[in-house]
Image (cartoon, grey):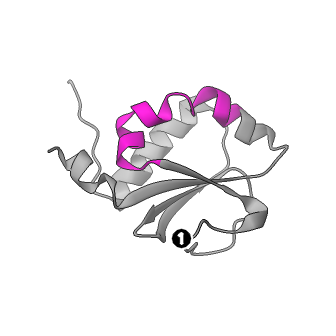
Amino acid sequence: MSATTALASDYRLIMVEQPGCAYCAAWDDQIAPAYPHTDEGQFAPLERADLHMGPPEGVTYARRVNFTPTFILVKGGEEIARMEGYVGEDFFWPLYARLLEEHTAFALTSND
């Protein structure tokens, strides 16, 4: 079993969104179809939450969510890191990989 598989059950990525959010829609178009098939998506499966409904059951945010989308990395239901906003896939993937590497045991394998 790989390290990614062994740790995946502990982590989730919560996407806090709201109806009418153009940036959420852009993320849905550009990232959502591929996300579950990536190493990142296997490590921290995506769960969605409505901004106005609060966190999913069993999840605690470290502070209030003010912007959508906000991506909250949780471990065992507790927030450990977040990214606010979405400005495109060219920025999302590197920022998210860095967030995972800084706050978890996740490391992308390189073919270099």
Question: Is the residue 19 above or below the residue 90 in the image?
Answer: below
At label 1, the amino acid type is Val
Closer to us: 46 or 88? 46
Residue at 36% x, 42% y is 42
Per the image, the residue denoted by label 1 is 59
What is the count of numbered marks?
A: 1
Please report the residue visible at 47 percent of the width from the left and 45 percent of the height from the top.
96
Give how far across and how far down residue 40 sits, in percent. 39, 41
Residue 89, quarter of picture: top right
The image position of residue 56, as x and y in percent, is 60, 65
Q: Is residue 92 left or right of residue 74?
A: right
Q: Is residue 46 left or right of residue 110?
A: right
Q: Look at 35% across and 47% down and name the residue there.
A: 43
- On the rendered image, what quadrant is the N terminus found in? top left
Give x and y (percent) for residue 22: 80, 38
Pick whichever, 49 or 22, lies toward us: 49
- Over which residues does the magenta segment extend? 26-45
Residue 31 lies in the magenta-colored region? yes
Chief secondary structure of the magenta portion: helix
The residue depicted at 49 percent of the width and 28 percent of the height is 34
User: From the viewer's perspective, is 49 left or right of 111?
Assistant: right
The residue nearer to you, when weighing 102 against 41, is: 41
